Image (cartoon, rainbow, N blue to C red):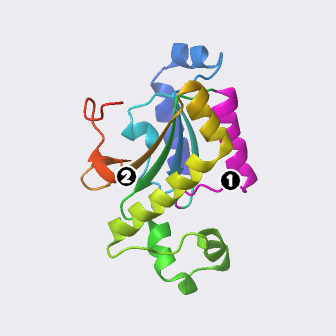
Amino acid sequence: MRRLQQGYTTFLAKNETAFYEKIAQGQHPHSFVISCSDSRIVPEHIFSAAPGELFVLRNVGNLVTPENPAFAAALTYAVSHLNVENVVVLCHGDCGAVKGSKHPDHLETELQEWLAEDPYDGDTLEGAIKRNGIRQFERLRELPLVRQGQVTRGLRVLLLFFDIATRRLERFEHGTWEPFLEGHSPDA
Ligand SMILES: [Zn+2]
């Protein structure tokens, strides 16, 4: 607990009073990010985003689970109420969820059940993580709310892969993985 208290003390010492008073008026995030709960994956860090910019849902394995009430509520709120411009599935290297799905019989029941729809699929770990990401991306794009957003107001749906050690970020686009850098994608 001391680590948390020390961290909060440091946070307060930054004196961001005016900024927090301003964002207390309301949130206008530009993106909804579906991220893994992995503690090394911090969307706000990766995208240099301040509080108020990203609406984030985290779960083990960055899974798209429309039948899950927590997922459905977050997606609906982000897309229909906050009118985000982008919906992002952010998968990442060394993902424990994907690693665990290789030997599900070694996992606790709760994890087995959570990962049941997404069996390990690939020759390498990165390959399996990316295949898993593509499955989530495809599930997301098929949802009526997302399709409607794409058609009516140009909602953009992205699948990104982040490699921890190198900080390489790639976007899955037209069947291939491309660097996610400013100016790289024609429709960025
Ligand atoms: Zn993960």
* Mark 1 close to ligand 1, CB under 8 Å: no
Q: Nearer the viewer, residue 69 or 39?
A: 69
Which residue appears at 57% of the width and 25% of the height?
153
Instruction: Find residue 107 and report its horizontal and vertical position in percent.
Output: 57, 80
Sequence-earlier tag: 1 or 2: 1
The magenta segment: 61-82
Q: Is residue 81 above or below residue 35?
A: above
Please give the residue where the numbered disc 1 appears in the rendered image: 66
Q: Is residue 153 above or below residue 104?
A: above
Q: Nearer the viewer, residue 146 or 42?
A: 146
Which residue appears at 31% of the width and 53% of the height?
176
Q: Amino acid at mark 1?
A: Pro
Instruction: Find residue 140 and report its horizontal and vertical position in percent.
Output: 58, 49
Is 67 covered by the magenta stretch? yes
User: Quarter-wise, where is residue 126 in the image?
Assistant: bottom left
Instruction: Find residue 4 and report its horizontal and vertical position in percent.
Output: 54, 46
Circle 1 Cα neighbour tier, 10 Å, few/some/many (<14 / 14–19 / ≥20): some
Q: Secondary structure at mark 1?
A: loop
Name the disc covering residue 161, or none.
Answer: 2
Q: Position of 119 compared to 26: left or right?
A: left
